[in-house]
Image (spheres, rainbow, N blue to C red):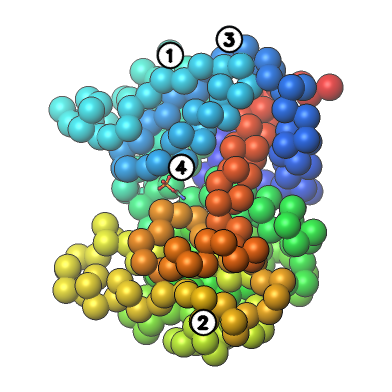
Amino acid sequence: MRHLMSPLDFSVEELDRLLDLANDIEKNPDKYAHLCDGKRIATLFYEPSTRTRLSFEAAMMNLGGKVLGFSSANSSSAAKGESVSDTIRMVSCYADICAMRHPKEGAPLVASMVSSIPVINAGDGGHQHPTQTLTDLLTIRSLKGRLDNLTIGLCGDLKFGRTVHSLIEALVRYDNVSFVLISPEELRVPDYIREDVLEANHKNYREVIRLEEALPDLDLLYMTRVQRERFFNEEDYIRMKDFYILDKAKMELAPEDMLVLHPLPRVNEISTEVDNDPRAAYFKQVQYGVYVRMALILTLLEVKVC
Ligand code: CP
């Protein structure tokens, strides 16, 4: 039995197969409509979510399966002190697979150690968000046609942004991918990403503060939100929250074929006036998230696809 804790749990070849499967699901949805008849996914969300929880549920329903779960710690027995390990033992009796989001880093890993069903990390604290990364990879490969030979700008909260950490770890495995890390000094990527991931894999990267400086060189801009929930003090959050705002004027500095991605939710960091720009791909990204989660469920449940 396989779990998914990190995007690195799949080899590059396995990822290619998963993304191929997601593209086939996009083209031929009817072929997949009953492959999970009789199966259930449990969505165990100890932290708020719109896209990840609902896209897992939509994915299982698109495959003919059913869903159960909870959307906050307060509506589960976690509020009475039940441990993640005990909860997953129960859920293993009710469902065939589960997706867990938790504010504590490593909580889904703890669950996977005692689970008798596959556990998917749906985001653990500031650590990893592997299914967002699968979504990002599918979006980039589908819209750019490749995952290599890219210059990628990552902008915003690179310190606490788990989507950024997971995406960098996944992309260093492809040839000739360069990174421009755009953040205020206080929100730079953690040392382990710089040293153990970028430098250890001999990747070109530079760190800049001004978005305007980076834009002309990018194939792809990955914007992120400054996350209020990760700050210890409100004053720091308020000082940082509007540090970057991508608007029409800044988009004029970017190449005509640069894609703009964002894991969402956004707050102010992308002005709504950018939404109609053909380079804005963040709503398409949401749709790709359903296809890739369908492919992931089929893969972890080892459902035979003819
Ligand atoms: N991208 C993402 O994880 O969104 P949610 O927090 O709404 O799930």
Q: Are marks 4 and 3 in contact (CB under 8 Å)?
A: no
Q: Residues within 10 Å of mark 4 (few under 14, many from 20)?
A: some
3 vs 1, front mark: 3
> Which residue is tagged 3?
38
Q: Is mark 1 within 8 Å of ligand 1?
A: no
Amino acid found under the numbered disc labelled 1: Tyr
Q: CA distance from mark 3 to mark 2?
A: 51 Å
4 vs 1, front mark: 4
> Which residue is tagged 2?
249
- Residue at disc 2, secondary structure: helix
Amino acid found under the numbered disc labelled 2: Ala
> Which residue is tagged 4?
51
Amino acid found under the numbered disc labelled 3: Gly
> Which residue is tagged 1?
94
Q: Residue 277's quadrant in the figure?
A: bottom right
Placement of the C terminus among the 4 image quadrants: top right
For marks 1 and 2, the one nearer the N-term is 1
71 to 161, vertically: above or below: above
Instruction: Find the residue positioned furthest to the top.
Output: 38
Q: Residue at x 20, y 65 (%)?
A: 232
